[in-house]
Image: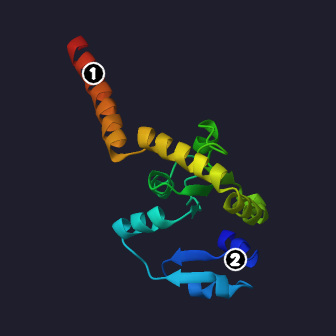
Amino acid sequence: MVVKEIVDAGIPVEVYGEGWEQLNCERKDLLHCHPSVDYREMLDVFADAQIVINVMPWAKAGFHDRTACGMLNGALVFSDETSYMREERLDGNKLILYTLDAIREVPGKIAYYLKHLDEAERIAQNGYQWAKENHTWENRAQQFMEIFEQYQSNVDEKAGGA
């Protein structure tokens, strides 16, 4: 639905994966369909993109790696919101959030940032810095180590007190 709104508003969109040819939209000429690519190739696509559109899967409380990958590759990311993204106050300074209830507003927002490239670049750079500090695989490994150390500390505490 989001892609349909964008294309029907006259903004060209590049999509990857199966089934996009079946999208029922008024401006099929602006929908550029590509075959599926693997994860590494998708990073190159993100690096070449001005804007990455993300639609969150069922997980509406977290953060998807597509979002982080778009940010880490310097693109301005548009994503439907999650509670995590709202709590982190990302909207407007690290990425652009939209709600599925208001997808008709998305094309206007995209058009705005395509005309205000300095502002789009500032947000993309802020997003890059934030994602680099919080959402790399190194960050995840550190978080796992902290969780494991806390778990091990609790186990050791219980074993010593038994």
Write down the quadrant of residue 27 in the picture: bottom right
Quadrant that contains the N terminus: bottom right
User: How many marks do you count on the picture?
Assistant: 2
Q: Nearer the viewer, residue 121 or 31?
A: 121
Indicate which label's residue lies in the foreground, 2 or 1.
2
Mark 1: few/some/many CA within 10 Å (<14, 14-19, 20+):
few
Q: Do residues under tags 2 and 1 come within 8 Å of each other at their CB atoms? A: no
Please tell me which residue lies in front, 47 or 152.
Answer: 47
Callout 1 amino acid: Ser
Label 2 packing within 10 angstroms: few (<14), some (14-19), many (20+): many
Measured Cα–Cα span from mark 2 to mark 1: 54 Å
User: What residue is shown with label 1?
Assistant: 153
Callout 2: SS: helix
- Image check: 13 left or right of 26? left
Q: Name the residue under label 2.
A: 7
Q: In the figure, is residue 62 to the left or right of 147?
A: right
Which SS class for mark 1? helix
